[in-house]
Image (cartoon, helix red, strand yellow):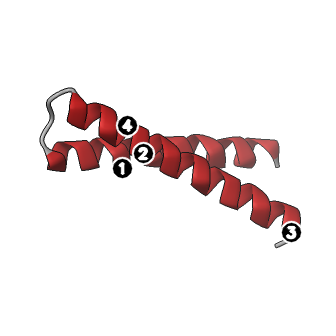
Amino acid sequence: MSPLQTLSLLLALSTALNIAFTAGLLARRSGANISQAILTGAGSAATSLGVYFAAVAAYK
Protein backbone atom coordinates (compact mmCIF):
# COMPACT_ATOMS: atom_id res chain seq x y z
CA MET A 1 0.00 0.00 0.00
CA SER A 2 1.16 3.47 -0.77
CA PRO A 3 1.43 6.08 1.98
CA LEU A 4 -1.56 7.92 0.52
CA GLN A 5 -3.72 4.78 0.69
CA THR A 6 -2.60 4.15 4.27
CA LEU A 7 -3.45 7.68 5.34
CA SER A 8 -6.80 7.50 3.57
CA LEU A 9 -7.66 4.28 5.39
CA LEU A 10 -6.63 5.79 8.74
CA LEU A 11 -8.82 8.80 8.02
CA ALA A 12 -11.77 6.55 7.23
CA LEU A 13 -11.24 4.57 10.44
CA SER A 14 -10.95 7.75 12.49
CA THR A 15 -14.14 9.13 10.98
CA ALA A 16 -15.98 5.85 11.62
CA LEU A 17 -14.80 5.87 15.24
CA ASN A 18 -16.04 9.43 15.73
CA ILE A 19 -19.39 8.57 14.16
CA ALA A 20 -19.72 5.48 16.37
CA PHE A 21 -18.86 7.39 19.52
CA THR A 22 -21.32 10.17 18.73
CA ALA A 23 -24.12 7.76 17.82
CA GLY A 24 -23.53 5.76 20.99
CA LEU A 25 -23.63 8.86 23.16
CA LEU A 26 -26.78 10.12 21.46
CA ALA A 27 -28.46 6.75 21.89
CA ARG A 28 -27.45 6.60 25.55
CA ARG A 29 -28.70 10.10 26.26
CA SER A 30 -31.99 9.40 24.55
CA GLY A 31 -32.77 6.61 26.99
CA ALA A 32 -31.28 3.43 25.52
CA ASN A 33 -29.43 1.10 27.84
CA ILE A 34 -25.68 0.64 27.45
CA SER A 35 -25.83 -2.49 25.30
CA GLN A 36 -28.26 -0.88 22.85
CA ALA A 37 -26.06 2.23 22.69
CA ILE A 38 -23.00 0.11 21.91
CA LEU A 39 -24.86 -1.75 19.18
CA THR A 40 -26.09 1.53 17.73
CA GLY A 41 -22.55 2.91 17.65
CA ALA A 42 -21.15 -0.26 16.11
CA GLY A 43 -23.87 -0.30 13.47
CA SER A 44 -23.24 3.29 12.49
CA ALA A 45 -19.48 2.68 12.30
CA ALA A 46 -20.00 -0.38 10.10
CA THR A 47 -22.36 1.57 7.86
CA SER A 48 -19.94 4.46 7.42
CA LEU A 49 -17.06 2.10 6.62
CA GLY A 50 -19.30 0.21 4.21
CA VAL A 51 -20.12 3.42 2.38
CA TYR A 52 -16.42 4.33 2.24
CA PHE A 53 -15.35 0.96 0.89
CA ALA A 54 -18.21 0.95 -1.64
CA ALA A 55 -17.06 4.33 -2.88
CA VAL A 56 -13.49 3.09 -3.18
CA ALA A 57 -14.64 -0.02 -5.05
CA ALA A 58 -16.77 2.06 -7.42
CA TYR A 59 -13.88 4.43 -8.07
CA LYS A 60 -11.45 1.70 -9.08
Residue at 70 percent across and 41 percent down: it is: 55
* SS of the residue under disc 4: helix
In the rendered image, residue 13, in percent from the top left (x then y), is placed at: 59, 56
The residue identified by callout 4 is 23
Quick one: 54 or 23, which is closer to the camera? 23
The residue identified by callout 1 is 42
Q: Give the CA distance from mark 2 to mark 1.
A: 6 Å
The residue identified by callout 2 is 20
Q: Nearer the viewer, mark 4 or mark 3?
A: 4
Q: Which amino acid lies under the numbered mark 4 shown in the image of this protein?
A: Ala
The residue identified by callout 3 is 3
Residue at 73 percent across and 47 percent down: it is: 56
Q: Eyeballing the image, is 39 above or below 32?
A: below
In the rendered image, residue 57, in percent from the top left (x then y), is placed at: 72, 48
* SS of the residue under disc 2: helix
Q: Which mark sits nearer the N-terminus, 1 or 3? A: 3
Q: Give the CA distance from mark 4 to mark 3.
A: 30 Å
